[in-house]
Amino acid sequence: MTSATLSAAHAANAARRGNPWGRRVLIGLAWLAFALFLLLPLYVVLSEALKEGLGTFFAAIVEPDALAALKLTLIAVAISVPLNLVFGVAAAWCVSKFEFPGKSVLVTLIDLPFSVSPVIAGLIYVLLFGAQGYLGPWLSEHDIQIVFAVPGIVLATIFVTFPFVARELIPLMQEQGTQEEEAARLLGANGWQMFWHVTLPNIKWGLIYGVVLCTARAMGEFGAVSVVSGHIRGVTNTLPLHVEILYNEYNHVAAFSVATLLLLMALVILLLKQWSESRLSRLKANADEE
């Protein structure tokens, strides 16, 4: 290796290291922000939840309305996430593998829930399916209830969580290209065989990462669900809505106790996110080396 190459390498390493004091200040500020905006709120939630002891804490969690809210939250997640998985994979497949008229419009529609307020999304469903909405009379005649019932909550959750799977898969599938699928096609594979044996193994970690993000968003959704739920206690309240009701009733210990359930679920999702993200980063690094 020549002296010029060594000098360039040393210069590159020095540029990456940067000013040690500046780096330490930035790291310290990052940890300070982490403590103020994450650790401190978590401490407040746990301390308030346990302020009157474990007995009061568990009583608030196993209270019938809290269990009903937990059940409804899990139902909404269990329905919306698999549907968004299917929709997201199909949309990513179309956008990344094919050229067709209206492709840019489809990409824009995928991003629409990011730009539309969840409250507006909930109001749209009320306008469509409410008693005074466009489809309200027909739904009433056939004894079908969408708004202020579980179907409305599921629809609102699907809308706000739709982009997460698709937006995670589209750049990944575009980066991988279509060469492997074309080779499988030349070897006689049909569409399903190409998907299960070629496409899916290549996108599985990105798919898992998107599903984790979608699940986290579905569990914590408040705005759209609040509009379409009707706040019927024990019937159409999810965990975030139940926490709001308890807090507005000045039952702070119960509110923070139920919020702890959301906190524990979020921690599990965070661990899954970190695991899937590390696997996805490792997969991309291996692809770059090849």
Image (tube, grey):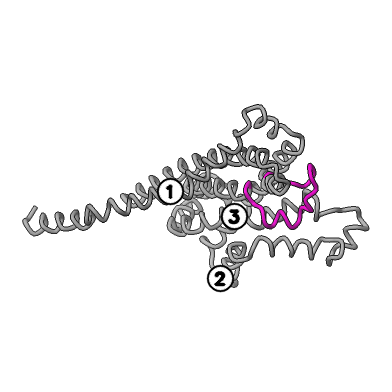
Tell me, yes or no, whether the two marked residues, 2 and 3, touch with CB atoms within 8 Å. Answer: no
Return the disc, 3 or 1, that comes first in the chain's sequence.
1
Q: Is residue 173 left or right of residue 105?
A: left
Q: Where is residue 185? Give x, y as percent.
A: 51, 53
Tell me if residue 220 is in the magenta stretch: yes
Residue drawn at point x = 52 percent, y = 45 percent: 41
Q: Is residue 18 left or right of residue 121?
A: left
Residue 57: mark in rendering: none
How many other residues sit within 10 Å of disc 2, few (<14), some (14-19) or many (≥20)?
A: few
Q: Which residue is mark 2?
A: 104
Distance Cα–Cα, label 3 vs label 1: 32 Å
Q: Which residue is mark 1?
A: 34
> Closer to the camera, 206 or 254?
254
Q: Is residue 269 left or right of residue 8?
A: right
Which region of the structure is painted magenta? 219-239
User: What is the three-letter code of the residue carrying label 1?
Assistant: Phe
Kindly state the secondary structure of the residue where label 1 is placed.
helix
Residue designated by label 3: 88
Give, as a three-letter code, the residue at label 3. Answer: Gly
User: What residue is shown at x 56% (from left), y 37% (from top)?
Assistant: 46
Residue 247, how many percent across, how many down? 68, 46
